[in-house]
Amino acid sequence: AGSAVSRRSQQIQAAAPFRMLFGFLRRRAAEESGRPGDDALEVLDFTFGDPHELAMPAYVEAIRDAAVPRDDQWFAYKQSEETAQDAAAASLERVVPLGWTGDNLRMTTGGFGAITVAMKAVADPGDEVVYTLPPWFLYEILAIEAGLVPVKVPALQPAFDLDLDAIAAAITPRTRIVVVNTPNNPSGRIYPPAQLSALAAILEEASARHGHRIWIVSDEPYNRIVFDGKPFHSPSQFYRHTLLCYSYGKTLLAPGQRVGYLAVPPGLPEAPELMDAIDSLQIAGGWLFPNAVMQYAVPDLERLSIDIGGLEAKRDRLVGALREMGYEVASPEGTFYLWPRSPVPDDEAFVAALERRGVLVMPGTLFETPGWFRICLTATAETIEAAIPHFRAAIDEARR
Ligand code: PLP
């Protein structure tokens, strides 16, 4: 007898990022339940971009207020709400000045929803989607679910820039999408204008050569989490055929409250057709619109942000301490991650050694980039202080 479940669901579960991510979570859960009552070992969690403190009061107030019905249609079926779109567009304009209006975007269930709709809007099953390693680990899953074929191009180490020659070489007649994630999770790199304009030139040329448009899906949920006053540049400023994906989950550090958007640059000739496709795919994908309450809250939420200065201070503290211990680590230009080189080539062994000390980080292998590991800076300053002696002991031990 065959399997009860579809081939596609089996294919999704078998994909490397899923196996590795859920294997990692299972091992961690087993380990935690395996030491009942062992409160001598404090768990210092640097894995996911989750909050470690209560949400900002203004955030809670915005949602509480949005939940109070103003009319009898308050909780009716809602597609993408115009008031949310208008507020989101005005705010995006301050980050990426291209003349955005509410009509240029649609509210989605976070970045996940935006990316999956973007992929399906411009690519058909069997088409290829190119992205850079280390990636956000769910691109592969979203691509497979859309029937697309992932094509992976390693970034240029140690700065983790786009490998433009390798991207150009990876383009085939089936290529429809190149995903760009800046500021980058996990490397913290903000791609400079020269790289984005060179990528645009490559894609213009390849689109002309193959007789169809190759799109950029620009995944930029961290475009407001930038440090040292460094300017952010969106691929959409260099290449008009860009689908811009945003999530409020990072700037507000509330990823469980699903809201984001998919934006199509102003003046794009294909825009009317594309917006219709997006509207249809959001319904067909299983009603991928954010809950009504989250959409009503967007104008207020757009005025809020986590404390970027506080994040920068945590970055500086931990980068400084790690370097002083002998770790090789770049200071991230944005996002809330550090991406140090593992002191031993086997990043999983090193991560396991940290785990025995109660410090949880993610191995580079999870990002298909062995030899590195990721530390998430959403942990509190106290957690960082508590972990510093363990990071020191682990590298000292690795060197013995
Ligand atoms: N893209 C990147 C690079 C991310 O890091 C994440 C979340 O970790 C997402 C997309 C998805 O964001 P959300 O869960 O807010 O939809």
Image (cartoon, rainbow, N blue to C red):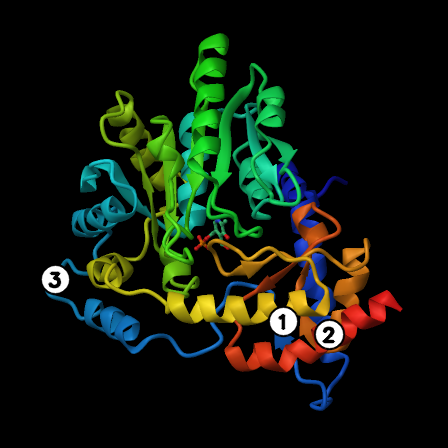
How far across and down, in percent of the image, does residue 101 sit?
18, 40
Residue receiving disc 1: 321
Q: CA distance from mark 1 to mark 3?
A: 56 Å
Q: Is residue 164 above or below residue 357?
A: above
Quadrant housing the N terminus: top right
Q: Quadrant of residue 192?
A: top left
Image point (59%, 68%), residue name = 320
5 vs 220, left or right, is right
Disc 2 is placed on an element classified as helix
How far across and down, in percent of the image, does residue 144 sit?
58, 36
Instruction: Specify few, some or many for label 3: CA neighbours under 10 Å numbering under 14, 14-19, or 20 or more.
Output: few
- Of the numbered discs 1 and 3, the one sitting upstream in the chain is 3
Question: Is any atom of residue 123 visible in this view?
Answer: no
Identify the disc placed on residue 72. Answer: 3
Mark in front: 2 vs 3:
2
Question: Is any atom of residue 282 visible in this view?
Answer: yes
Disc 1 is placed on an element classified as helix
Q: Quadrant of residue 2?
A: top right
Pointer 1 residue Cβ closer than 8 Å to ligand 1: no
